[in-house]
Amino acid sequence: MAVKYVPNRFFYELGIGGNNFLTHSYKLALLGSGFEFDVKTHGTYGDVSASEIAAGNGYATGGYDVLIEAAWAQDDVNDRAEIVFEDVVIVADGADLPVFSAAVIYNDTHASDIIVGCLQIGVDVLVTNGNQFQLQQISFRLRMPNT
């Protein structure tokens, strides 16, 4: 089961207006086997890009374009906000893709490519030639603690 993380930098960017889910573009990048996300130090795509799988066989460096499936929403029942992205289908074409264990969604419009969140898949994933892997119902629920 995937564990989801939202970096501290994302909360900061929300506060200063650096992220706009209505007008910005987002990408999903795959990160290699053994990658461990750190909410304190992994705030931008540049912070994790060295761990991205190699381009080729159906994958392009920088990842897949993703669309927002459900608008940024307020959830008063659970006291949080939520953003939902479309499903992403990863297809190996020509040979196997390199093994990956995490994916990040980042704001491709922002000058610093701010990470919205990370899906730590929990296992190594190998997509063999001609096969596919689908990430479904990619969502991040944000809740600021009341202190």
Image: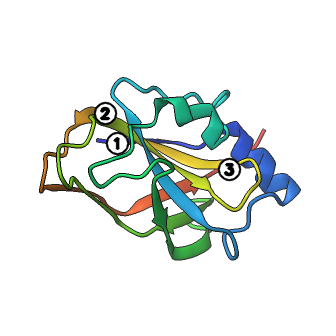
Q: Which mark is residue 74?
A: none
Q: Residues within 10 Å of mark 2 (few under 14, many from 20)?
A: some
Do the CB atoms of the residues marked 2 and 1 lie less than 8 Å apart? yes
Disc nearer the start of the sequence (1/3) = 1
* Residue 60 locus on image (x, y percent): 42, 52
Disc nearer the start of the sequence (2/3) = 3
Q: Residues within 10 Å of mark 3 (few under 14, many from 20)?
A: many
* Residue 25 locus on image (x, y percent): 62, 67
Secondary structure, mark 1, is loop
Badge nearest the viewer, 2 or 3:
3
The residue tagged 1 is 2
The residue tagged 2 is 122
Residue, x 61% and y 72% (percent of image)?
73
The residue tagged 3 is 113
Residue placed furthest toward the right: 16
Q: Amino acid at mark 2?
A: Gly
**Quadrant of residue 146 in the image?**
top right
Q: Can residue 121 be seen at all in this image of the molecule?
A: no
* Residue 69 locus on image (x, y percent): 47, 75
